[in-house]
Image: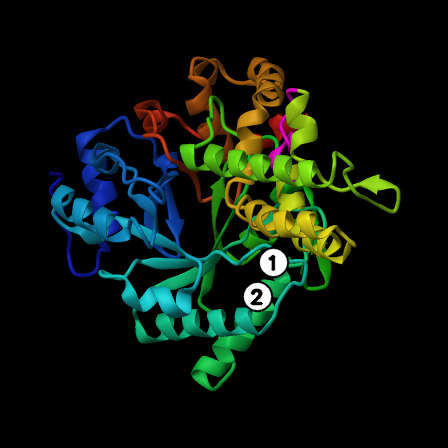
Amino acid sequence: MLTISHTEDTHPAKAFADACWAQNPALTPDHWRELDGITVGRVALDWREDVGSPAAVAQGFNLILTSVRTHAQAAALLAQTLSNPAAAVTVCVLEDPAAQLPTLSPAPTFALWQPPYAVAGFDETAARQLLALENAAKSGLIQAYGVADVTLAAPQTSRPLHRWLQHAAQAAEAAWGRRKRPALRLLAAPFDLLTPGLLTHATSLHHESPVTTLEHAARLSLGVIALPQAAPGAQPSAAAVSALTAAAEAEQQLLAALRNQWPQVENHPLFSLLLPLSEGLPPWSTPAEAVAWCTLLPELSAQWSSLPLPAAAGRVLAAYLPALSALPPYAPALAGAAAQSHLRAVFSHISPKLPPAWQSLSPAALNLALLASFPAVTAVSSAAEPPASLLTLPTLPDAAILFK
């Protein structure tokens, strides 16, 4: 157990960083970041699916992503690992904050709302969830909140950052009865070497000037947690493979019911999983392509529902569409695993331009280090235990080298 001593005016996370430094004098100052005034490590441990090893926490990776399913287990493990569990900063990702946040015990430090894929940007559901999060911050249940929006990295997102801030401001005014800065203080979004949209797409507005999401976040001192969907050696989870298999089998049954005549709309065949799979190709070649497909899935479902189909095919369609609708949570990860050849090509181009100390890193460690070096990125999430080499590695002096 790592013993942490702190005074009343020192946050436990800062005392944790000091204790880590005392144990490991070689630890670089670049390892530590500030998330809404709290000291956190440059890598966020992704415990949303499975709770990992407490050894990584004790080393200096004290930012933890949890889910409703794993939060209680993670909190219990942190209580056993740290003399002051408040040194670990938990960020719970919620699909329905209004209903789920009050059920969490202990409460997380931050709550992240993960809105569903949608063509429309904001609706009454968004207003209700943001108001619930603002009220939770107002009451002190959480320190602040954020959004985990996979569409933020898209070239033409319907939910750009400036719109999030506008709706959060409305929620803050409703919660406090006066104009007040909203408690929206962090973002989580796809960001990797194949999906750099947060850095390259000027989809947001700051003082009416187009800016990228990362630039806007930096100007407002918002925390940013990068969620790599394409990482070296990434393999799809068993649940992802199962969901893809179920959808492919449902499509095979639908194709048989249609007598192998796949329908077309405006002279273009509707999306098919079996066509690329039968040729040994993935349904989506990159995470960005998968996110775009997930966003358009409601439109695809509407096209299917509007087709005049035989009764037998209509009954099979009733099973096929739910199978497709189960894919969005897994599609970006499936695409990330399929994009390994693209990622290897990127690394082979980048590696010769890096300092010698960086070139000796394993691909997984190099990927985390590169992404964490971008300005405005507070932390990069990792489901695997981060290597100890990251603790003593300074950030890249000029991350722009990656795009030269």
Q: Residue furthest right?
A: 267
Q: Residue furthest bottom?
A: 177
Q: Main structural element of the magenta stretch: helix, strand or loop?
A: loop
Residue at 74% across, 34% down: 260
In the rendered structure, find residue 161 and report the number of the disc placed on it.
1
x and y percent of residue 309 in the render? Answer: 75, 51
Tell me the magenta residue range: 280-288
At mark 1, the secondary structure is helix
The answer to whether residue 102 of the structure is visible from this angle is yes
Which amino acid, mark 2? Leu
x and y percent of residue 268 in the render? Answer: 84, 40
The colour style of the image is rainbow
Classify 10 Å Cα crowding around label 2: few (below 14), some (14-19), many (20 and above). some
Which amino acid, mark 1? Leu
Quarter of the image for the C terminus: give it: top right
Does the segment drawn in magenta span residue 402? no
Classify 10 Å Cα crowding around label 1: few (below 14), some (14-19), many (20 and above). many
**In this view, 343 is above or below 172:** above
At mark 2, the secondary structure is helix
Q: Quick check: marks 2 and 1 in contact, CB under 8 Å?
A: yes
Residue at 62% across, 44% down: 291
What residue is pinned by disc 2?
A: 165
Q: CA distance from mark 2 to mark 1?
A: 6 Å
Which quarter of the figure has residue 207? Answer: bottom right
